[in-house]
Image: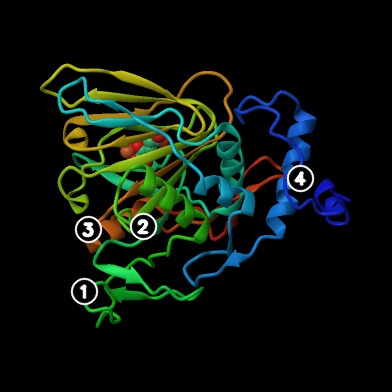
Amino acid sequence: MSKRIQSFFQPIPKKPKVEPSSPDPSQPSNALDIEQEQEEQHEEEQQLPLTHHPAYPFPIPNLPPHLSKALSNISSTPKPITNHPHLDLLYFQPLLPPQTAHYLFHFLRSSLPFYKVQYTIHRGQTPTKITTPRNTTVFGVDATSTFTHDEGNKSLLCTKTNTPPPSPRYKCHPRPIPPCLEHLRQTIQSVTNTPPDYYNFILVNYYASNTDSISYHSDDERFLGPNPSIASLSLGAKRDFLLKHKPGIQAGPLKFPLASGDMVVMRGETQANWLHSVPKRAGDGGGRINVTFRRALVPGGTENYYRYNVGDGGVWRWDGDRGSMVLVGGEESSG
Ligand SMILES: O=C(O)CCC(=O)C(=O)O
Ligand SMILES: [Fe+2]
């Protein structure tokens, strides 16, 4: 009998009894402690209410009560970083206490559907197939649409008229933000002094190891409007977040070694003038989750985010026994 099946027949702890053996999930101090803790977390997650939606590939569990409680009690003062041309950052170091970040990392990794998106870019005449070097997922819809507030079967309404859009507005299938991420969104809006319902998109990256990465880019898409605010929360393994000025001015690279629970908010002219990346690095490192909160203004933003964060390939889900993401539905995208 597998350890996981065995554990079904044992009494279920109401709350995690084991303290995290290390505040940094990438640095386990004792493999047995970690395994036991993961078993307990798995059992706990089996008991959680699930949120269903036709656009979710599988139901998504609500947050365990201890995490909801912890997220309701977050207060943290950020350090403003504005000492370079056009740079406007808020650095929460940390936003979440180590234990909260630790449990949230494991909860999100095992609860959300992920993807490995492929797409083709054209460099001159040559088409090049790109496989995103990390797993991604996305929830939300741009400001022209709103999900009904009913439980479960949320459907889309036109924000202006509060009625169903006369003809389908999207080719993609927008997904409502599930309650577990909604709770986090409320916390982030409160610490960043943004209005309720400001962030209408949540993008999640999963970096399985130090070889997963995101190359230098800026999130300056027109559908975010001018000077967008993007809040970016790190959970799990520590990774370097690099920023350098776009060509024209020599500034950077600046290096922020983001640890579990840290958050950076990029504001003002930052996206218009700076590039950011999380480069590959040498050595073994554990998994890392990055959650970004953004506000898209128009349907083009919704199409773009679902194209590049869900795509048309299979669904990946965390497998605790294997300790990796596995393809659970559909096939690898053909690109
Ligand atoms: O993982 C990170 O910290 C950055 C992610 C990012 O830049 C993005 O998703 O646009
Ligand atoms: Fe980015």
Secondary element at image label 2: helix
Identified at 35% across, 54% down, the residue is: 201
Q: Residue shown at 29%/25% (left/top)?
A: 243
Spatial CA distance of label 1 from label 3 is 13 Å
Mark 2–mark 3 distance (CA, rounded to whole Å)? 15 Å
Q: Which residue is mark 4?
A: 39
Which of the 4 image quadrants contains residue 270? top left
Q: Amino acid at mark 4?
A: Glu
Quick check: marks 2 and 4 in contact, CB under 8 Å?
no
How far, Cα to Cα, is label 2 from label 1?
A: 23 Å
Mark 3 element type: loop
Q: What residue type is disc 3 on?
A: Leu
| Mark 2 vs mark 4, CA separation in Å | 33 Å
Name which residue type carries label 1: Lys
Q: Secondary structure at mark 1?
A: loop
Kindly indicate whether the residue at mark 3 contacts the one at mark 4 (C-beta within 8 angstroms): no
Q: Which residue is mark 3?
A: 297
Q: Nearer the viewer, mark 2 or mark 3?
A: 3
Compute the Cα span from label 4 to label 1. Answer: 47 Å
